[in-house]
Amino acid sequence: MALAGCRAALARLVLLPLALAPLRAGPGSAHPQCLDFKPPFRPPQPLLFCDQYSAFGCCDAEQDAALSRRYWAVTRRLEPDTFAGCAAYVRDLLCQECSPYAAHLFDAEDPSTPLRTVPGLCKDYCIDVWHRCRTIFRHLSPDPELWALETNRAKFCRYLSLDDADYCFPRLLVNENLNVNLGQVRADTEGCLELCLVEVANRLRNPVAMVHANDGTHRFFVAEQVGLVWTYLPNRSRLEKPFLNVSEAVLTSPWEGDERGFLGIVFHPQFKYTEKVYVYYSVEVSYEERIRISEFKISPDDMNTVDHRSERIILEIEEPASNHNGGQLLFGDDGYLYIFTGDGGMAGDPFGKFGNSQNKSALLGKVLRIDVNHNDRGPLYRIPPDNPFVGDPLARPEVYAYGVRNMWRCSFDRGDPITKEGQGRLFCGDVGQNKFEEVDIVEKGKNYGWRAREGFECYDKKLCANSSLDDILPIYAYPHKMGKSVTGGYIYRGCESPNLNGLYIFGDFMSGRLMSLRENQATRQWQYSEICMGRGQTCMFPGMINNYYQYIISFAEDEAGELYFMSTGVPSATSPSGVIYKMVDPSRRAPPGKCRIKAAPVKVKSRIISFEPKEKFFSQTVTARPKPRTTPKAPRQSTSTARPTPSTPDWAEQILQLLRSRSVTPTATVLRPTRRPSRRRGGRRKGRPTTAPPPPRNGTVRLLNHQSPGRDRGRVEIYVGRRWGTVCDDVWDSKAAAVVCRQLGFPYAVKAAKRAEFGEGHSLPILLDDVRCTGQESNLLECSHAGVGKHNCDHKEDAGVICSHQDPDL
């Protein structure tokens, strides 16, 4: 094919209109990126000048108009004959700023490197333009080095070449690997969708929830299992003073996998006017474990803290065991408060003839719905008149749905941003027993099968055979070889990643899998795709990372609808290992300016702590995990067979090949491995453990205090070599106390207590003496000391501490 013919074919072929339907497999090596170091986008309206990039690229109408002005400024300087032969080259070169691969063409993948003034050219094309129109480069580029090479073709074209020839212009226009499914979510051979992450917050102690106030401020509030809630501003900075602190009342422990604690928080849907917040946490009342639903009001003096004196207990439910505590609170579009409780714990729901979950007169194992509106006078809550069992004398009127085991994280679908399709659907992840985890859509009055059924299969065969069961099957279930503790997520309805619209994203606490479901509109079946972290260059954008900690605790939406998840490397309520990640599609973003928000002002009275990211981009090649098959009755993922990538032929020949066929090059996934804790379903009856808790790590500390109330003070006891012991106070000071308090989750040490202020530990050995710390150590064993078990003191010198969440100097 003659060169001129090739260029004519290119003009017709470049970036054929792409159907940007999400979740198609994409190339494994392609990395579309614009000159602003962000992914490309679909322009909101067709481009008039660089029209070949109207379907997908890096220019909007404003940038397109600017390039048009540059084109006419250059071509006005050309002689008529030169214009006739070279104007098309000028347009080609200028419009490469709109290419989805503009960053590669101009060597701009790295923000720290200098930007090319002319896109990188393929050798044949460069030779052609040099022979015909080399004078145009004096008008296109201010680069004196390029001008100096104008008379030397070989050096000139070498100067304009790219190290990666696959991205040179115009070869990249017909490179199948770069253009197949361009702009769609990338996936590997097994359909694993490649996404990226942005770190949002870190050093959190089991972050169990992240919510927003829906008040226009775009603040987000992060709850830790220990009972503290922190305020974050839209720029990710955190306020030093907690939004809420009920750590004194919350029942939890440092044990890995302890399910008790502060579990849920939600703002009233009319928060701007009511200033009310609702929380869900574990408490102990007269040696009885309970779950408590409370209401707080915002402090009149500080919009970023609650008035702790305003707490009103809306509801308390006795917990017969320490696991299966539920923990989700949501407000529906109907304005009612939805409460999600576990079945009471232990295993197999052994309470009563049919278990708590099938007993409509019990509040455990249920989805409850109550009306807390206008409750300043009269009852703290009312029963919505359309609750399904209002007229049933054998049922509690609060019950909205039943037959659930331990729903961990639920969400309402906001609906499609344009059509509102799906709005109001209630999705939940329900943690399984021995074999399956499931995802349900919860509807009024329905029975979700537990303990008769687990996933799609029978658990209690006798109860399962009962014809009156009439239970609703999950939309998806997966076996325990894929994961053992589902964490429910959200349907993505944000603005920034349009390909993800309608995708339900969830995870598994134990395996660390990120997963997704998409509804087939024709069959109404849900199709599964795993989510993996982008490999190679996929996530090489400023601020993006491609790895996360394994234990996926919860998911969240911000006020704009963008999606986040929280995970940790050490699943203990006192370990500051939790991180919040924002999920990002690196293949396509929204057009510039479309997702811009204008946050309402926030009056800040607390010190602001700037956000400092800790996580890094992970560039090491990692072997992909084997992908287990899902449950036979669950909707299956469809996979396509990928053809091998052909060797690169002459770029002109690729035009013909692209017209004949398109292929896919797969990539793999990344997951950071960490230790496994006890599974969320394991539990114990109060006072009689059914399974032994995992042993503490060497250096673990606890406070023992029989004299005064509060978990923030007590005698220091340390675990070393499979035994607990005390610490002598010979040189015990505030720096050592600070190490202990920080290890227990308290930022401040109020007092280094001496002389057995909190009692003598006669039954324990003295394990540490002469402890000298700098205050920065992670535990006392890292401090200088006389040696484990070596001491010259007695228990009258047992050391203690008083810790605090508040700065004692303020």
Image: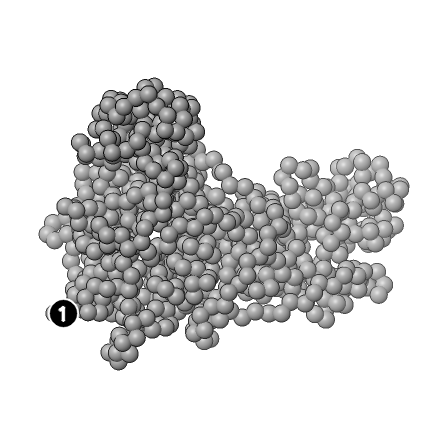
The residue identified by callout 1 is: 394
Most distant residue in the bottom direction: 467
Visible in this render: residue 478?
yes
Above or below, comparing residue 773 to residue 649 in the picture: above
- Quadrant in which residue 185 is drawn: bottom right
Q: Secondary structure at mark 1?
A: loop
Q: Residues within 10 Å of mark 1 (few under 14, many from 20)?
A: few
Q: Residue 599 location, x and y as percent?
A: 40, 42
Residue at 75% across, 56% down? 171
Q: Residue 700 location, x and y as percent?
A: 36, 37
- Quadrant in which residue 338 is drawn: bottom left
Residues 346 and 148: in front is 346
Q: Is residue 765 left or right of residue 420?
A: left
Q: Residue 778 location, x and y as percent?
A: 42, 32
Residue at 35% across, 66% down? 441
What amino acid type is highlighted by mark number 1?
Leu
Q: Is residue 532 left or right of residue 691?
A: right
Q: Is residue 251 left or right of residue 380?
A: right
Quarter the N terminus occupies: bottom right
Tag count: 1
Q: Residue 156 location, x and y as percent?
A: 84, 43
Residue at 30% across, 31% down? 765
Above or below, comparing residue 80 to residue 787 in the picture: below
- Quadrant in which residue 770 is drawn: top left
Residues 396 and 508: in front is 508
Q: Is residue 37 left or right of residue 298?
A: right
Quarter the C terminus occupies: top left
Visible in this render: residue 580?
no
Above or below, comparing residue 762 to residue 255 in the picture: above
Residues 794 and 214: in front is 794
Residues 726 and 337: in front is 726
Residue at 20% across, 58% down? 370
